[in-house]
Amino acid sequence: MLEVKGLVAGYAGSEVLHGIDLEVNEGEGVIVLGPNGHGKSTLLRAVTGLLSPRAGQVLLDGKDITRWRPDAIAAAGLVHIPQGDLLFPEMTVTENLLMGAYHGPTWSERSARLGRVYELFPWLKERGGQLARTLSGGERRMLALGRGLMSKAKLLLIDEPSLGLAPLTTQQIYASIHKVKESGLSLLIADENANHVAGLADRVYLLETGSLVRQGPADELLRDKALLESYLG
Amino acid sequence: MSTQFVQAVWGGILFGSVYGLMALGLTLVWGAVRLLNLAHGAIFVVGSYVAFFVVSKLNLPILVALPIGVLAAAAFAYLMHLIFIRPVIGKPGFDNSTLIATVGISIAVSAAAILIFNPEYKVIPPIISGNFTLSDVQITKQGLLVIGTSLALFALVYLFLTYTRRGMAIRAVSQQQEAASLMAIPVVRTYGMVIAISGALAGLAGVLLSPFFFLNPNSGFNPMIQALIVTIFGGLGSVRGALVAGFVLGIFESFVEVYYGVAWAQPGVFLLIILMLIVRPNGLFGIGEVRRL
Amino acid sequence: MAGDSFTRREVTRRSVLVGGAGAIGGLVVGGLAGSALAPKSAGTGAGSRGSIKVVGIFPIGGVIASDGKEMQNGVQMAVDEINARGGLIGYHLDYVVIDDKDSSTDQITTAFNRAVSVEKADVIFSGYHLASGPEFDIVANAGTLYYNVNTQIAWVNRYKGNPSKYWGIFQCDPTESWYGQGFAYWVDGALNAGLLNSKVKTYSIISGKSAYGTVIATGFQTQIKQLGWTELSNDGVSEGSVPAWGPVLSRVKQAKPTVLFTSDFSPADDAAMAKEWAASPTKTLVYQQYGPSVPEYLTLAGPAANGIVWATVLGLLPDKIGNDFRARYKAKFGAEPGWANAGGCYDEVNVWAAGVAMSGDPKNYKAVAKATESVIWRGTTGSISFVDHTGVQFPAQTADASVGQPHIIVQIQDGVQKVVSPTPFTSGTFVLPSWMR
Amino acid sequence: MSAQAAGAVGVSRPQLDQAAAPWRRPSIWAIGGGLAAGIVLPLLLVRIDIGTYLITLLILFFVQAVVAQSWNLIMGYGGIYSFAQVALFAVGGWTSGVLVHSLGWNPFLAILISPLVAVVAALGIGLPTLRLRGVYVVLLTLAFHELARVFAVTGPRFISGGGYGLVTVQTFQFGDAIGDQRTIYLYYLAGLIFAIATFVIWRVIHSPLGVAMTALRDSETYAVSRGINQFRVRLVLFAISAFFTGLAGGYSTHYNGGISTTIFDFPRIIDLLAMIVIGGWGTFGGPILGAGIVIGLNQYLVALGDYQTLILGLALAGIAVFAPQGLWPLIRRLYENYLAPEPLAPAVEVSPAAPRDTTEEL
């Protein structure tokens, strides 16, 4: 479904990604594992158009979306839940969620989706009228996830789902992601902790200093503790 | 009630509505696009001249000219967005470039207006004429219309921003542009929409106010400066702030004029603003850098 | 970081030189090209004896552009008429216009330097400049001729201080000091004659905050105080930015003076004020400055203008000469002339032409100036003759209408401008405004 | 820390390598050549027909270039949107005007006081203003401009001259020199002011203070976190800028023989802004180039009347959006391609192209 070919990207003055090849198939859960600062976020940003790649191609269902604007990419079904959540701070929880469903659906469909997200995160319903900026870290993450789920995503890209969260919250978050995966959505998750993603992953890529150094089925790679140890420290 | 008091109150409410009407468009654009639109006065002038043209050259009634003027102002603002704003969206230096570009547009518009319509003052007929007096104070019906329109527009804009999908999208874009684009909200098109709405508001203000102030190529300048003051006083990007600040400053100014003389009004307003900025550096409802709209 | 900043310095050291060279290059090229491509006189051609270089300097592109255009039209018309008659004693007039924009000191300096050293003017004509002053020394040093309608007492003082230096400069109208003064005399007289339906000598001032507005308001204030009147209120407004007159006028209405003197000269402000006043007036005579003389004032103010009084020391008279001029002006430019600058500038060209004709040689500037001193020219603004190289005001300065320019007081009656003073230039009589009866 | 904080504004920085300092390394020939050309130019110009007028244009250029450079120093480099520039020019102009006009001072002495008073005024504006952010600075400086205008028009007579400003101030006298000779002397005086201002501004831009202000402009968060005192940097810049603006104002008054209240009219601000934008916002040579272009074009386009303003407005908007660095980079490129003896390091005069806040990017 998603195909990335020879992607090169970076920021003013420095190249971060040096030619990434990656693919995600329908219904698959793909994990990009790598230590901090090796280009996981940059990869997701380049794929969803927040950063324009210097070379390479991003294909969605065979269509070249490399130079598309982020909103067009999102409308096409690649929905990115970024690091740091990026909520709309002066909007209520409900409004944040509704914004997730900006593209496409009618109001009735939106409320149906809202119902589904509330099922997944019942807690969000109670806080519906609260401003997003008043939420705690874990609550923010859940809201960000929920907002992503409001969209008509084909593939959800999640950047470091557990970054900066307490262990208990982390567990909750991954449990919810599991449910999402079970509903049949494709996932591309960037993470630095192999343990968290064990049950989610079908395939794993290992990213080191801007290059993918290994890839393979999750069962195989994630069991190789020595390998993981050497990459992730 | 004394004549002076009635005059001060009436003048204050009228000034306040006028300031608010101009400030609403300015604050909307700042809030959503982060654009200090110094061409707001020029757009005001474009709307007024188009309405003037429709009334005096095409001999159509003012009620026809009003929507045409408003649409022309919106179209002009959108055109400005396409040519001068859109190319720099998201680029570094956006603030500088657009600030200067809007200054350039505003002097170009007034030069064009001189070339087309010559520098003489023009007059646009009021939508409703006539007036009555209330304890010796002249209350014009057009003035009441301006007050009503201004309040209604504030309510409309508020409802639009709070309850509609596009309105919420405008707030989303203004608060977290990156997240908005990840939610498939078309950021650039939303900017264009806000600028066009703001242009329509400026055009409407132009057509409504020209019967009072008359129309010349620079007649948008003073209302814009007043609006800028109001916007800053109320807190840039705050719709509620623009409304409250418009009335606070309008009434303050009116009372100073009536009881202390016009000469003190302007220094008084500046003094008030400096004091306010010391106490609340982000304006009355100013919400700093992140909290907008 | 350190290395970085060193290359930075290295680079910009060169930039210094290129910058300087580039800028001076641009300037010189621009300047040369400018002088080469400057507006050339419309009809270049020589009369039987040659041509005279006539330069007009007006604020055409700035804040007082609409006045500037009237000045330019007035001079243009006079020059065209002279050329159409076959030139001036055999010379063709070669006319060039220079714009001094806002006519601030530096713009005046540049424009006049250009007139004397690039255009090599035989004579320079102007209306007024907001910052008149710097041009006199430029003209005096160049030893050329300069005619204007600056309306400034400062000129008289300057001339008196050094008449041998400023021999070639003529202010072809009375000074602004007569403005407030003349109206103060008139209103005092009207009150004493019982024309104002009041015996109380009180006044209020709403002055424009611009230079012009301030000067005129102060002039009136000084004079009317000397006549024993009492000031009830005094306010200053910024011209062109009065949002609503209600609060401003409410102070005047509270004070109920016999006369309200306004020096806000913006026609739009004046019209808006007249409208606000007409809605709920008190028994006060309203004087406005300049605004009502602009043709569009009557359109803007409508019936609210009736009863308003205004005045000018440089007035296009409503008599045969003035009305003929109005008709020709309208035919030529497609618009009514205002009451002051078009006529004043038209007249000054003819005054100079009379001087040339008397002296016989347009290039002998001293002789032309000498002759001008004794010219008496009955123009569109009255009789122009010179005392201290300045026009003479009638009736206060001279009682002889044949050597003075009348300071006309005008009242709007039924949408028509009527000159109500001084006789014999009147076209109507003062009528107590409806709200004062 | 105390040793590091010894810099003018408490910037942490390495010691300057004096040997590498630019003022030791400029080509004496190049600068000397420029100065010599500047000195000889008027002597040649007076020999041609319209030469005297060209000299007066050059004087105008010197004055305007000083004001534009000073403004660019705070707006282009410092990122302070001050619109008080014309007002500060007026403060300088009025100061020496009043000293000469009312107290009978010698103009040459009086213009030395102008910059000082302008600096005091700048500090007065700066203290309440410079702690605020962008648009608030625009408003408050415009307010100062407006109040200065009102005061100049309606103030006491020795200041307002009855409303028109001081229009009869004594001009510079150079012995008995008159005519062309006097114009040449005036030229040298203006040229001297221009040269000093240019040199000082160049030094400031490339000093630690300059580095600090560029850092503040390009990434305020980062600069502040590195211990740069934003307020002090801005205040110092503002004062330097006001100094030369005031000096130019003083010169202008005694060159023109007066200063009028129309100086406050909006088109004057636009003209100066155009110089900076057209030449190159936040570049060293930009405002100088811009002053030359705007003054030159003003002469050239004089026949166009209102079309001139139309073109100016559109040019301003177009350049701001499509060539935010103005024409300066173009000149640089030409120089590099055809004239530079050796390849130059890449341009560092970034200005608008610098990220607003680099921390956001990473």
Image: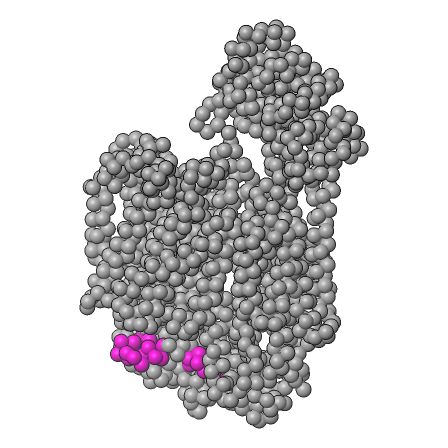
Q: Quadrant of residue D190?
A: bottom left
Q: Position of residue A196 (x, y in %)?
A: 64, 16
Instruction: Using residue B257 as the reference point, say whether residue D319 is left or right of it.
Output: left
In the rendered picture of this protein, how many numbered marks are placed on residues?
0
Q: Quadrant of the N terminus of chain C?
A: top left
Residue lying at 44% horizontally and 56% vertically, measured from the top left? D125
Q: Which residue does the image show at 73% across and 46% down from the upper left? A: B159
Identity of the residue drawn at 61% across and 27% down:
A82
Rendering coords of residue D29 (x, y %) = 20, 41
Q: Position of B68 compared to D271: left or right? A: right
The colouring scheme, among rainbow, by chain, secondary structure or one colour, is one colour
Position of D354 relative to C247 (above/below): above
Indicate the quadrant where residue B245 lies: bottom right
Is residue D267 rendered to the left or right of residue D333?
right
Along the line of sight, the residue nearer the viewer: D210 or D170? D210
Give x and y (percent) for residue C160.
Answer: 31, 81
Q: Nearer the viewer, residue A162 or D328?
A: A162
Q: Farthest residue toward the bottom?
A: C193
Nearer to us in this view, A203 or C103: A203
Q: Quadrant of residue D177?
A: bottom left
Asked if one can make out residue B88 in the rendered structure from this viewpoint, the answer is yes
Is D281 one of the magenta-colored residues? Answer: no
Spot occupied by residue C60 in the image (x, y as percentages of width and height): 45, 64
Q: Residue C78, relative to residue A19: is it above or below?
A: below
Quarter of the image for the C terminus of chain C: give it. bottom right
* Magenta-span inclusion, residue C168: yes
Above or below C192: residue B56? above
Q: Residue at x 42, y 39 (%)?
A: D227
From what the image shows, is residue C352 above or below residue A115? Answer: below
Would residue D332 be seen by someone viewing this image from the given angle? no
Q: Please state the extent of the stretch shown in magenta in the rendering.
A: C155-182
